[in-house]
Amino acid sequence: MTHSTPDTENPSFTLVITGAPYSSQAPQTALGFARATVAAGHTIDRIFLYGDGVHLASALVTAPSDETHWPKQWAAFLEEHEVPGVACIASALRRGLVDSDEQKRYQLNANNLLTPFAIAGLGEWVEGSIKSTRTIYFHAGA
């Protein structure tokens, strides 16, 4: 097993979002941080959604026309910068968020995962925390 030395001059980040859009500032604050991080030339290794943060990956969120559609804003950011966006599978299933695999597994009528998000286990969070020089949390109170 090899361990890498953190690159303090060019840090990379894993962002963990636990607050839901429209009931917390966490997704908005995290997106502002992510945009500033990329603009500064740093790397974001992945976005991990946990708890109510998984609502950010729902394709069924419908924002009023005069409000920012935070799930679409995040999806565009992830695609533009090729950053993986992962929703915790346990949190997702508890909150009614499923991809096509989970739809088949649980014999559900539909799925609602917004592209390019993926559903995966906590191993993705662990891997991101190991790979990144910093892991930043955006909680519901953020």
Image: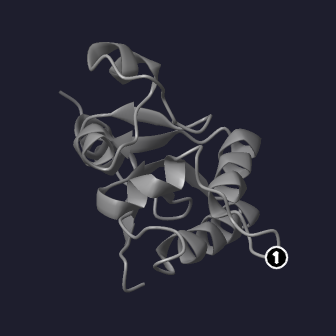
The quadrant of the rendering that contains the C terminus is bottom left
Residue drawn at x 75%, y 75% as measured from the top left:
67
Residue 52: image location, x then y, percent: 35, 62
- Describe the colour scheme in one phrase: one colour
- Picture layout, residue 106 above or below residue 75: above
Where on the picture, by quarter, is residue 107? Answer: top left
Residue 92: image location, x then y, percent: 33, 44
Relative depth, front residue between 117 and 128: 117
Residue 22: image location, x then y, percent: 54, 74
Q: Which residue is mark 1?
A: 66
> In the visual, does 138 lie left or right of 11?
left
Residue 82: image location, x then y, percent: 66, 38
> In the visual, does 66 lie left or right of 4?
right
- Picture layout, residue 14 above or below residue 45: below
Task: State the residue lying farthest toward the right.
Answer: 66
Question: How many numbered discs sit on the rendered protein?
Answer: 1
Q: Secondary structure at mark 1?
A: loop
| Circle 1 crowding by C-alpha within 10 Å: few under 14, some 14–19, many from 20 | few
Relative depth, front residue between 113 and 74: 113
> In the visual, does 98 lie left or right of 46?
left
Task: State the residue lying farthest toward the left.
Answer: 1
Residue drawn at x 23%, y 31% as measured from the top left:
2
- Picture layout, residue 51 above or below residue 115: below
Evaluate whether residue 13 shows in this view.
Answer: no
Where on the picture, by quarter, is residue 116? Answer: top right
Residue drawn at x 52%, y 36% as measured from the top left:
113
Relative depth, front residue between 30 and 44: 30
Residue drawn at x 59%, y 39% as measured from the top left:
114
Task: State the residue lying farthest toward the bottom.
Answer: 141
The quadrant of the rendering that contains the N terminus is top left
Question: Looking at the picture, which amino acid does disc 1 mark?
Answer: Asp
